[in-house]
Structures are given as structure tokens and as C-alpha cells.
């Protein structure tokens, strides 16, 4: 039986269902999946989304801080000796990757990269780090990219397109849909009472609370929405380094409800109370929640979205406003949609169609087939 090991510096909770399903899929094809993961740095840990998996191996990272940068050493070489394929995150700060690539050249285990293809959050990217990443990204045996855009980036570096698997990154949408179906009208009414919501003009934000998310922009725009629709209310779910901004706003304005971090299907009833998903800054996997729960997303075309923004079709399954959009312009778009049930229904249909494509089942199948191809290539 072949052994494939994924080495990742952290294990987010949302990724657990993927690893569980991938392990089962591969085991049926006589391939053993192993997982090694560490802990997030303190700033990332504030998101409170770190998970644990019983069959995985938790190996604490050793972190070297250089100014605002972090270099990671993952002390797990002794756990990789019998692996035929090692899948690592594409990141220049992961020192283990360089050693694994050197060992591969000397006849050691095959190394595959998993990642975006480049750092989409460009302002935070190290120039030297990105140069190293580009150089070493072509030295792996195989590539797993989040989206088609990532595949184009990696192929553009000179890596063979036939050795790139596009996995269409997503979350466990089936569990979200199941929770939605199980949630009764009585439960929703009870939740509305607990939140003291007196309106149906509700929007939601969910995600990390950090600068790329443009939380001050969101709060500013929400005040403007409230002036146009006096019973508008906003639910905010998440945690992070800018939690204080949201807590302060929620204490000052009773129509802004901060609910703390919630994960997986915990978020579903709150989505069901909401007409729109407001994320004016960075959008990542939350777009999958938007699709499956049919709560259309409104965002802006900032240059640092995660690759999953590729799934959004403007005016079909969400709204992508121009980069120069101000809080007032954003608010006007939200107000227009809140007052236009027909347009919201059209966007919800687009979400439903997209949800059928970006499923965890499809992601697992794509990833596993890539693994099987990489083993024999």
C-alpha cells in the first residue's frame, strides 16, 4: 500500500471534513493518507479556528521571527521516511520544503505542492520570499492548485500543465445544506427573539476580523444602510485581531450584533435569518457558504481576494463592485438589493447553480485522482 503524507503548518477546522473524506476515498484505492500539522502563530490563533484530527500527527512548529516575518521549521522528517508522496504547502517560509526538494533530487520521496500559485495578498508578500517561491515552485513532482487561476499561474512559471490538478477549493457544503433543511421555522423564530431582531432586513458578515476584511468600511456602510432602511440590522460572526472594533460598535449600536466565532453548521441559522452576505474586503471560502445557503454576497474588487473569488460571476451569483467603491456606494447597492426581492431571487438561483459545482465531494474526487496520478507519474 502506498503512503501519501500531507504536511501543513496548521489545521483549520473547516479542513477536517476534507481530510476525513480524502482518507476514506484513498483507502478504498489502497493508498494510506497521513497528516502532519502544527499550530498557528499567536496572531492567527486569534481567529480561534484551529482543529484536531484523531488519526493525524500534531507536531509543534518551531518558529523563527525575523522582523514582521516568520520562518517555520516542521520537525517531522522521521515521520516521512516511508512515504512515496509528500504534499506540502507552497510557501517560501517553510524551511522543510527546501530539504524535501533536495532529497527528491537524490532519489527521495516525490514532493507535491498545494497552494494558490502566488501570494494573492500582495502587500503582505515578501519580495524575496515570492522570488524564492517562484523558483522552487517548478521543482516539485506534482501540483495541486485551489482554482483554475492558480493552475494558469503555475503553468506560467514553466511547470507542465499535465502535472497540475485543480481541486476547486471548498468546504463541507453538504453538512451546511443538511443543517439548513433540519432547521425549523420555530427554531428561527426563537433565534430571532434571542437576538431581539424585529425585522427581516438583516444582513450577515462572517469571517476573520482583521484589516484585509475592511471592517471599518463595513461598519461605515452599515450606518448608511440603516439611514435608508431604518430597521436594518447586521449580524457579525468571527474573531481576530480587530475584534475590538466590532465589539465597540456592537456596544454603541444595538442593531449591530456581534456573535463571536462560529464554525461549520453553527453559522447556518444565522445565514437563514439574513438576506445578504456583506464582505467588502477579502473574500475566500465564505463564497461557498453563500452559494449553498443561497445568501448572495456583495463585495468589492480589491486586489487581495483569495483565489475562490474566481467562483463569483458578477450579477449572476453575487455582486462584485468596482475597486473605487466608497462606503456610500456600497450601501446604495445593499439598499437596492434589500428592497428588490426579484433581483435577490435571481441571484439566489445563481448561488444554487454554483453550489452544485463547488462541493466537497467534487474537491475530494479531484484531489484524490491527482494523488493517484502523481504516484504513478
Image: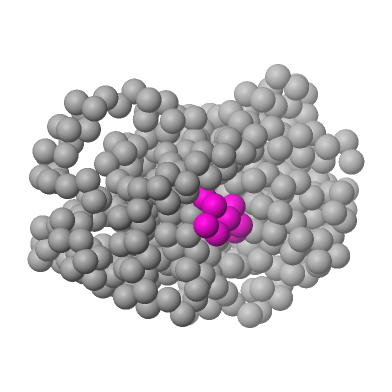
Residue at image position (10%, 66%) is 252
Magenta stretch, residue numbers = 307-317
Color scheme of the displayed model: one colour
Relative image position of residue 112 (x, y in whole percent): 75, 49
Q: Is residue 354 visible?
A: yes
Residue at image position (48%, 60%) is 319
Q: Nearer the viewer, residue 302 or 374?
A: 302
| Magenta highlight on residue 181 | no
Up/down of 167 relative to 213, above or below: above
Relative image position of residue 142 (x, y in whole percent): 80, 49
Residue at image position (71%, 37%) is 366
Up/down of 71 relative to 349, above or below: below
Q: Nearer the viewer, residue 19 or 189?
A: 189
| Placement of the C terminus among the 4 image quadrants | top right
Q: Nearer the viewer, residue 3 or 329?
A: 329
Relative image position of residue 271 (x, y in whole percent): 33, 42
Relative image position of residue 62 (x, y in whole percent): 51, 58
Up/down of 63 relative to 340, above or below: below
Q: Is residue 83 left or right of residue 171?
A: right
Q: Is residue 219 left or right of residue 311?
A: left
The quarter of the picture where residue 170 lies is top right
Q: Is residue 249 left or right of residue 20?
A: left
Q: How many marks?
A: 0
Q: Is residue 11 visible?
A: no
Residue at image position (75%, 56%) is 151
Q: Is residue 131 left or right of residue 258?
A: right
| Placement of the N terminus among the 4 image quadrants | top right
Amino acid at each position: 500500500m502506498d503512503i501519501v503524507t500531507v504536511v501543513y503548518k496548521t489545521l483549520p477546522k473547516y479542513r477536517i471534513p476534507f481530510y476525513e473524506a480524502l482518507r476514506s476515498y484513498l483507502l478504498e484505492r489502497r493508498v494510506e493518507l497521513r497528516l502532519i500539522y502544527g499550530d498557528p502563530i499567536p496572531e492567527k490563533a486569534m481567529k480561534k479556528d484551529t482543529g484536531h484530527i484523531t488519526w493525524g500527527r500534531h507536531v509543534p512548529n518551531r518558529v523563527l521571527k525575523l522582523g514582521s516575518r516568520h520562518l517555520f521549521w516542521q520537525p517531522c522528517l522521521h515521520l516521512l521516511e516511508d512515504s512515496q508522496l509528500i504534499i506540502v504547502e507552497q510557501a517560501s517560509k517553510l524551511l522543510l520544503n527546501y530539504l524535501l526538494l533536495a532529497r527528491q533530487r537524490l532519489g527521495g520521496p516525490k514532493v507535491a505542492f498545494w497552494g494558490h500559485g502566488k501570494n494573492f495578498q500582495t502587500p503582505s508578500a515578501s519580495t524575496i520570499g515570492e522570488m524564492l517561491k517562484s523558483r522552487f515552485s517548478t521543482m516539485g513532482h506534482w501540483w495541486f492548485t485551489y482554482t483554475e487561476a492558480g493552475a494558469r499561474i503555475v503553468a506560467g512559471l514553466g511547470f507542465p500543465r499535465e502535472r497540475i490538478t485543480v481541486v476547486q477549493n471548498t468546504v463541507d457544503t453538504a453538512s451546511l445544506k443538511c443543517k439548513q433543511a433540519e432547521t425549523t421555522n420555530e427554531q428561527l423564530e426563537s433565534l430571532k427573539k434571542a437576538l431581539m431582531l424585529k425585522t427581516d432586513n438583516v444582513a450577515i458578515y462572517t469571517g476573520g476580523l482583521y484589516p484585509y476584511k475592511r471592517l471599518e468600511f463595513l461598519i461605515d456602510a452599515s450606518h448608511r444602510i440603516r439611514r435608508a432602511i431604518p430597521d436594518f440590522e447586521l449580524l457579525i460572526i468571527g474573531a481576530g485581531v480587530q475584534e475590538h472594533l466590532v465589539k465597540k460598535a456592537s456596544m454603541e449600536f444595538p442593531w449591530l450584533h456581534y456573535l463571536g466565532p462560529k464554525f461549520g453548521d453553527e453559522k447556518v441559522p444565522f445565514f437563514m435569518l439574513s438576506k445578504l452576505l456583506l464582505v467588502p474586503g477579502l473574500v475566500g471560502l465564505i463564497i461557498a457558504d453563500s452559494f449553498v445557503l443561497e445568501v448572495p454576497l456583495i463585495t468589492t474588487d480589491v486586489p487581495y481576494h483569495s483565489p475562490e473569488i474566481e467562483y463569483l460571476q458578477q450579477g449572476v451569483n453575487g455582486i462584485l463592485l468596482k475597486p473605487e467603491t466608497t462606503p456610500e456606494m456600497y450601501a446604495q447597492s445593499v439598499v437596492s438589493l434589500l428592497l428588490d426581492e426579484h433581483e435577490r431571487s435571481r441571484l439566489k438561483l445563481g448561488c444554487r447553480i454554483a453550489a452544485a459545482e463547488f462541493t466537497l465531494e467534487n474537491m475530494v474526487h479531484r484531489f484524490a485522482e491527482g494523488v493517484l496520478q502523481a504516484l504513478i507519474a
